[in-house]
Amino acid sequence: MKSIVRHMRKKYSELWKEQNWKKLRQNLFRLQRRVFKAVSAGDLKKARSLQKLILKSRSAQLLAIRQVTQLNKGKKTAGVDRKASLSYRARFELLEELNDYVSTWKHNRLREIPIPKKNGKTRILKVPTIADRAWQCLAKFALEPAHEATFHARSYGFRTGRSAHDAQKLMFLNLKSNANGINKRVIELDIKKCFDRISHKSIMDRLIAPSGLKYGIFKCLKAGINPEFPEQGTPQGGVVSPLLANIALNGIEDIHYSIRYADDMVIILKPEDNAEKILDKIKEFLAKRGMEISARKTKLTKTTDGFDFLGWNFRVQKNGKFRSYPSADNFKTIQKKIKAVVNSSNYGAKVKALKLAPIVRGWRNYHQNCKMDGSRNSLWFAGKAAHRKFLKEKKINRHEAERLVKKAFPAVPYKENKHVNVKGTKSPYDGDLVYWSKRNSKLYDNAISKALTKQNHSCGYCGHKFLGEEIVHLHHIDGNHDNWKPKNLLAVHQSCHQLIHRSRPKGQDI
């Protein structure tokens, strides 16, 4: 009996690994592109029919399960059922469940996890079960291309093909010297408890979806409500929640020239603009959606005084030159992270260097379009502190300590305001594969960028273009991570990288 069970486990694992993920991605993308084109042409009836096909598509269902169980950052977070992962067998059982009940899906309760905020308060993260996350991911596959055809060009948060760097570059274009940025003002807009107060009606009225999907989204919203506000709020922690927030807030950009990233927004004012009138219009817009402005956090600021947005501090100098730096809060956060690793007594110097490298590299990559010279932004003091700490170990001499510090604080080149913005309202679902694959390739530097160019901006494993939000990984063909010769490097999807290491012994050429 045990041998039969063992055989079945092996069968399920092999069946999962043998899925042609390239073909599945192509099948899903083909349907999503058709949804986008239908909405762009104003044919909502056809769009809803295509959305039904996505929901019933085995390709979409498999990719949704794979996304929430293997690829998402929070894949190990359990819901109320306490399941933090699924076996291969359980994944196929979930596949059948999705197929049978996709139009009549009933959500479980949400697990509440308190997350501390900067101001000392707590944010309640509401985590669905893995099954509910898979359904939400499937719903997102159907909803996203439809609404991408309607979203505003200056909305950048939680959208495929767009990033915070697009918002940063747009800020530069509006506040640079030849745009008269020195005489402009900005309204730093803060929406009070945005995710907790969004009216369900405002979401449902604007949702482009067939009736079965609308029913599921409504149940999803109701699963995460605050009893005090039964008709408001979208649960923070759900896969589809950011998209629903974008749907509700879409159109706020038309009131006045502004840059929006999810619920964070900056309104740019010319000298002749009336700030009070603009705020009144925004208040009216938000009131219809059950939200309101936070009077305490919303403020009118001169560009010469500087303001924070998305972890950056933007400022126009007295000479009219635009500058952006990591904000004070953002810098304090990276300091805490570095100190926590450097001062930890659980690791030696070599392990600390390995743990610090991705933290520092990630921070520097995020700020690569800022002015990053000087002792503060170059993390000079943090590097010196790490060096002193490494030297305290008996087996670490001066030369070894210096080598480890270089490893722990990898250099990332910066170029002020050199990011290339996405064109207008373009979307990955518009079918312009060449534009999007080349654009996604430009978001990477050094070895990854060279590998992508050599591979014609396609995955070296599956051959599919780099579209969507999946991260590009660099695979070492011979298995030696110290061998950085161009011939040994292959740019692949994150998921393809996982498949390579599951299916190939170390050192075997793919």
Image: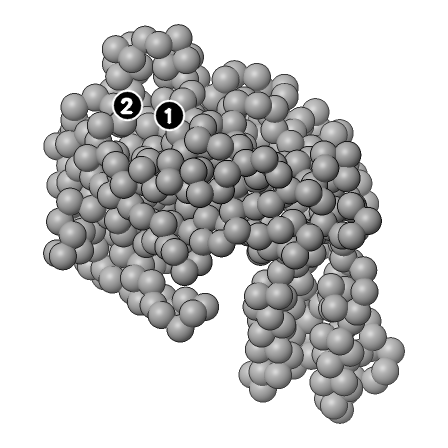
Q: Is residue 229 visible?
A: yes
Which element carries disc 2, helix, strand or loop? loop
Name which residue type carries label 2. Ile
Name which quarter of the figure residue 454 lies in: top right
Residue 373, position as x, y percentages in the image: 81, 60
Which quadrant is home to the C terminus?
top right
Name which residue type carries label 1. His
Q: Residue at the location (36% across, 22% down)?
A: 146
Residue 450, position as x, y percentages in the image: 77, 36
Quick one: 207 or 284, which is closer to the camera?
Answer: 284
Where residue 147 is drawn, which disc sits there? 1
Residue 108, position as x, y percentages in the image: 15, 50
Q: Residue at the location (19% across, 35% down)?
A: 201
Quick one: 120 or 388, which is closer to the camera?
Answer: 120
Where residue 208 is drawn, which disc sits there? 2
Q: CA distance from mark 2 to mark 1?
A: 7 Å
426 relative position to 93: left or right = right
Q: Residue at the location (74% across, 30% down)?
A: 453
Q: Are marks 2 and 1 in contact (CB under 8 Å)?
A: yes
